[in-house]
Image (cartoon, rainbow, N blue to C red):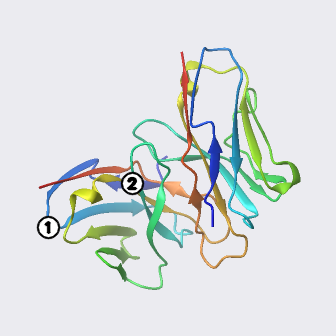
Amino acid sequence: QQQVKQSPQSLIVQKGGISIINCAYENTAFDYFPWYQQFPGKGPALLIAIRPDVSEKKEGRFTISFNKSAKQFSLHIMDSQPGDSATYFCAASPSGNTPLVFGKGTRLSVIA
Amino acid sequence: EAGVVQSPRYKIIEKKQPVAFWCNPISGHNTLYWYRQNLGQGPELLIRYENEEAVDDSQLPKDRFSAERLKGVDSTLKIQPAELGDSAVYLCASRKTGGVHNEQFFGPGTRLTVL
């Protein structure tokens, strides 16, 4: 049973465009929703995270939109750059030291 | 501040051989996780430690996998004997206990290839 469903599996965006990656979750106990960025040969790096008490969080070019009633959240990358080309994972967990449940990842390619 | 350190970075072994991975978490991080990442997938938890105590090992295949975290700092994950299906990236992550959010910091991983 996949608790966090991520789409699309891959995404190609023109430089300067907007990249949008979506995730849906099932467990209503989840209350922490991070996005990780992973480059080849590297471990996942925390990009941005949100708690369900807000509907949006923005950090630079990266924005998380959160819809608690629909149990969905998404990552928007504005003005996408070739350096943003990586695999992005959404994740979720209940509060505390609990393990993260990851989506299957989205491979983003930003082309010039 | 140094990040999570893992070694080796790459390991190639033949099936039925033993293998061990080492992790040094970020200083002061009492919670340590071992995740396995199969090709094209997200990481999946194997085991979680709070200090030296394994508090969540339900996903660890205990017939061949073992882990330890002596003195509550460094940790070792062992596979004996390795099988072809164990080929994956083994990631170590750590978290500062008592932090407001569940921020986990990952190491670069050990890529295991079983031939």
* Quadrant in the rendering for residue A19: bottom left
The total number of labels drawn is 2
Spatial distance from mark 2 to mark 1, Cα to Cα?
A: 27 Å
Above-or-below relation of A43 to B112: below
* Quadrant in the rendering for residue B8: top right
Q: Amino acid at mark 1?
A: Gly
Task: Judge by depth and name the residue closer to the eye, B108 or A100.
Answer: B108
Q: What residue does disc 1 label? A: A16
Q: Nearer the viewer, mark 2 or mark 1?
A: 1
Residue B47, percent from left and from top: 70, 47
Q: Secondary structure at mark 1?
A: loop
Residue A77, percent from left and from top: 26, 68
Q: Are marks 2 and 1 on the same chain?
A: yes
Q: Is residue B85 left or right of residue A67?
A: right
For marks 2 and 1, the one nearer the N-term is 2
Task: Identify the residue at image location x=77%, y=50%.
Answer: B74
Mark 2 neighbour density, 10 Å: few (under 14) some (14–19) many (20 or more): some
Q: Is residue A34 left or right of residue A57?
A: right
Mark 1 neighbour density, 10 Å: few (under 14) some (14–19) many (20 or more): some
The chain to which mark 2 is attached is: A
Quadrant that contains the N terminus of chain B: bottom right
Above-or-below relation of B31 to B63: below
Q: What residue does disc 2 label? A: A5
* Quadrant in the rendering for residue B84: top right
Task: Identify the residue at image location x=76%, y=63%.
Answer: B30
Task: Judge by depth and name the residue closer to the eye, B44 or B105.
Answer: B105
Quadrant that contains the C terminus of chain B: top right
Task: Identify the residue at image location x=44%, y=56%.
Answer: A4
Above-or-below relation of A111 to A93: above
Point out which mark residue B64 bears: none
Q: Amino acid at mark 2?
A: Lys
